[in-house]
Image (cartoon, rainbow, N blue to C red):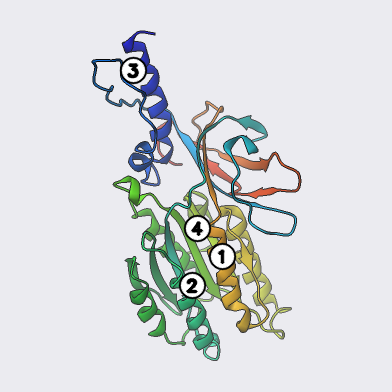
Amino acid sequence: MSARPHALAWAAVLTLAFAPYAASGVSRALLAQVPQPPAPQGQQPPLPSFRAGIDIVSLTVTATDPEGRYVTGLDAGDFLVFEDGAQQDIQYFNRSNLPVALSLLLDTSASMDEKIRTAQEAAVGFARRLRPQDVGELIDFDSRATVAQGFTSDPAALETAIRKTTAGGSTSLYNAIYIALSELKKVKARTQEDVRRQAIVVLSDGEDTSSLVSYDQVLDLAKRSETAIYTIGLRAKDQAQGKGFKEAEFVLRSLAQETGGRAFFPDKIEELAGVYSQISEELASQYMVGYVSKNPRRDGAWRRLAVRVDRPGITARTKQGYFGPSRQGTEK
């Protein structure tokens, strides 16, 4: 092969590695992970070039065994990815523990008054698990949703913000999640070290009562994001059968399911620290998988996803789907 075709072939590979993550702001950093081919003797390595029109779908995948334990050490060949039932070819795979941009949401409504101290301690313990390369923010919500601490890599700053929260007012759960998703969209990667998975961990003890945005608006924004949502619903025994909590449980379950996260419903506030520990362990055990869709249509339609692991007894979890590209190259 001559030097010119070799360079063009590699440019195509770089294009596949670059395009997938443009929406989430991690494209250039992931590009740096793609190994450059050796240049012909006496020549400089070819400069990367890109072309428009190629979109890679990026997935964060969690693998578990029959006992629910997280499975690490799998290879790209162990995963099967399907879009609308059609198997796809994996183009990008990473099993390293990439940093996380985490939005921590804490319900501080009046109903949390007797539980707020225990909730704070559990949230502080979770914040302390963040590594130096991770960033986190705190949003507390009652009648209003407030960014109490912007994104920081300093656990002490998060701890201070958590301990300053007080209980009172109604519950604006949807507002808080909407703000968190919007804040995470601003997190951009400028270098390889800036590449981060995105996650929201939200704790609430009841249904939304005062948001300005609707559940449907929040769900739509979540499905268009690259963010996994982990939900924790605190329920008292006398509350579990009530209509209000059943509605809240549906909301928390569906947001987690659609985005590849997980929903937890501890019966006792004392179980909260263990729940946060499980979420932290999951975030440290995930894979990133990317593929170029075989569907050429640019209609902005919803595409259903499924990921399987080609090993007995191991199951995979990821977001349930995504909106395909539109003719204008933007989301619908």
User: Pointer 1: residues within 10 angstroms few (<14), some, or many (20+)?
Assistant: some
Looking at the rendered structure, the secondary structure element under dot 3 is helix
Between 58 and 239, which is closer to the camera in this rendering?
A: 58
Residue 22 rendering spot, x and y as whole percentages: 38, 40
**Could one spot residue 310 in this view of the protein?**
yes
What amino acid is at disc 1?
Answer: Ile
Is disc 1 in contact with disc 3, using a CB cutoff of under 8 Å?
Answer: no
Give whichever of discs 3 and 2 has the lower sequence position: 3
Q: Is residue 248 above or below residue 259?
A: below
Between 71 and 20, which is closer to the camera in this rendering?
A: 71
Query: 202 left or right of 195?
Result: right
Looking at the rendered structure, the secondary structure element under dot 1 is helix
Query: 201 left or right of 256?
Result: left
Q: CA distance from mark 4 to mark 2?
A: 29 Å
**Mark 2 = which residue?**
126
Give whichever of discs 4 and 2 has the lower sequence position: 2
Residue 109 rendering spot, x and y as whole percentages: 49, 83
Instruction: Tell me which residue sits at (30%, 26%) in the image.
Output: 48
Q: Quadrant of the N terminus?
A: top left
Instruction: Tell me which residue sits at (65%, 72%) in the image.
Output: 265
What amino acid is at disc 3?
Answer: Ala
Residue 157 rendering spot, x and y as whole percentages: 33, 75
**Mark 4 = which residue?**
217
**Mark 3 = which residue?**
7
Q: Residue furthest front?
A: 41
Q: CA distance from mark 1 to mark 3?
A: 43 Å
**Mark 1 = which residue?**
279
